[in-house]
Image (cartoon, helix red, strand yellow):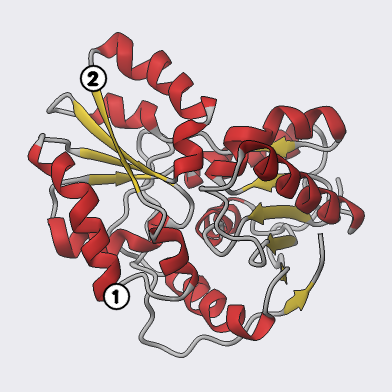
Amino acid sequence: MSDAPLGVFDSGVGGLSVLADLRRALPGEDLLYLADTAHVPYGARPDHEIRDLTDRAVSALHARGVKGVVVACNTASAFSLGHLRSRFEMPIIGLVPAVKPAVLSTRSGVVGVLATPGTMRGTLLADVIREFADPAGVQVMRAVSTELVPLVEAGQSDSARTRSVLREILTPLAQAGADQLVLGCTHYPFLAGSIRAEFGDAFTLLDSGPAVARHTRRVLTERGLLSGREAGGQERFLVTGDVERAAPVIAALLAASGNEGSLQGGGGQGSEQAYTDGQSNRAAPLPRIESTDT
């Protein structure tokens, strides 16, 4: 057993969607979340810069004594997992876009993937398409935007501009008959309400958070690293940018990710985890947030 915290890393606040799934799967674990808000978004950055920033963030968590790290960022996972695993003996767990459950669930034979430019360039998405979609004869349509992550970071998950961007990039998928939409960025579960408002039930929304949480529990169990507690785990938050700017957005998204909503967990068959649209009408207490460098 180990009562050391589990590290969770994202380029910004999007990984809070994964944090919510981790909390449900690991109620006794202390979670230390690091948001690299000074450098978000990662998606349009060069490959070597994504690897360097991810390495620095995971190193900062390691220096604080975490027993493992969940890289709750699709772009960072796409470029950095092999490098990180060669550097650290602790478990490094990354994200894989939820293409497999989308392929298993589609009736139209067309699925969409909404992701950042970085995730689109990386090998993980291409690998899962080749492994699961191609043999099944399922067409995978890609939708990409550089605007959506900054909009979520700014607390504008349901703004007019966000809905406009979603209409522009997802309409071709809807017109082509895509019935599954893989949310290939941890920021995008917080867009579920906006997607539903614009497209109704045209898409089933899938993300990999629930599957990652289950896998994390298995890894910690196998390595004897689970906390001895069955409940009562605490969260702490580190940000590399402006704490005052990040705090209300983090508070709102934490509140939202604990509510029932319209997002079906796409990590596996039978998953029923849900999110709201990232907007909260109730006041959310400010979480414990510290400034840090990486």
Give the residue at mark 2.
Answer: 138
Amino acid at circle 2 = Val
* Residue found at x 86% / y 45%: 1
Q: Can residue 198 be seen in this view?
A: yes
Count of numbered tags? 2
Residue 188 falls in which quadrant of the image? bottom left
Q: Is residue 257 visible?
A: no
* Residue found at x 21% / y 64%: 164
- In depth, the one of 294 and 198 nearer the eye is 294
| Residue 273 percent location from the top left of the image | 40, 52
Q: Is residue 5 above or below residue 52?
A: below
State the CA–CA distance, disc 2 to disc 1: 33 Å
Name the image quarter holding the C terminus. Answer: bottom right
In this rendering, would 244 be left or right of 108? right
Q: Earlier in the sequence, mark 2 or mark 1?
A: 2
Residue 159 bears which disc, if any? 1
* Residue found at x 78% / y 49%: 58
| Residue 250 percent location from the top left of the image | 56, 74
Q: In this view, does 64 lie above or below 123?
A: below
In the displayed orientation, state which residue is furthest to the top: 135
Q: Is residue 272 above or below residue 218?
A: below
